[in-house]
Image (cartoon, rainbow, N blue to C red):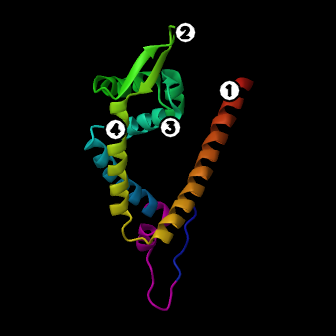
Amino acid sequence: MAFRPTTHTSDSARGLIEERATSEGLLLALLGQQAMRRLRKAHTEHKLSPRQFHLLGLLHDRGALTQRELGTLMHVDASILVTLLNPLEADGYLSRERDADDRRRHVVTITRRGEQQLERAAQAQCDAEDELLAALTKTQRAQLRRLLLILREQSTGEADRVCTTAADASTRS
């Protein structure tokens, strides 16, 4: 990163620290941490971690999935996935059954109880987001969402290119 010298304005000179403290990247990171704390609190009040919330959301939206499909969609290792699934199954939020076509695979399905818990946690998340974004108008909030989606798309595209480049390099060696 190249150093950008501060420019003096007629109002007052901004120092390097002040400029960096209000940079878009740092503000996004700090607000992201605050948002994650609030969302984690909303989820944990409903006995779910953010990852478990995501997992139940995937089952809700996509229907029954194999454990392998869930791990791939969530970008988590099989051993981590099991640590997410076990308490959800113990609480009755999902069921795991052997695949009739391939007994080595487990099919995971959200239960009615899991749907209800997901709905409560989703409402708590919406409430936390409303509180976090209360200073914004409806229009500003929609604009922020559009901008964040653009950044996410760019970030995802870059990650995919890095993974593809790394995979290509490993196949050549």
**Could you say where residue 16 lies in the image, as x and y percent from the top left?**
45, 72
Q: In the structure shown, which secondary structural element does the residue marked by tag 3 occupy?
A: helix
Q: Nearer the viewer, mark 2 or mark 3?
A: 3
Label 3: how many Cα within 10 Å (few below 14, some 14–19, many 20+)? few
Tell me how far mark 2 sits from mark 4, CA to CA: 30 Å
Q: Which residue is found at the position 63% from the left and 36% from the top?
A: 163
Tell me how far mark 4 sits from mark 3, CA to CA: 14 Å
Q: Nearer the viewer, mark 1 or mark 3?
A: 3
Tell me the residue that label 4 is attached to: 116
In the depicted structure, whether residue 147 falls above or below residue 18: above
Badge 2 or badge 3: first in the primary sequence: 3
Tell me the residue that label 2 is attached to: 102
Disc 2 and disc 4 in contact, CB within 8 angstroms? no
In the depicted structure, whether residue 162 falls above or below residue 82: below
Q: Which quarter of the rendered picture does the C terminus lie within?
A: top right
Badge 2 or badge 4: first in the primary sequence: 2
Q: Which mark is residue 170?
A: 1
Q: Which residues are magenta?
A: 8-26
Disc 1 and disc 3 in contact, CB within 8 angstroms? no
**Amino acid type, residue under disc 3 in the picture:** Asp
Tell me how far mark 4 sits from mark 1, CA to CA: 45 Å
User: Is residue 148 visible to us here?
Assistant: yes
**Amino acid type, residue under disc 4 in the picture:** Gln
Label 2: how many Cα within 10 Å (few below 14, some 14–19, many 20+)? few
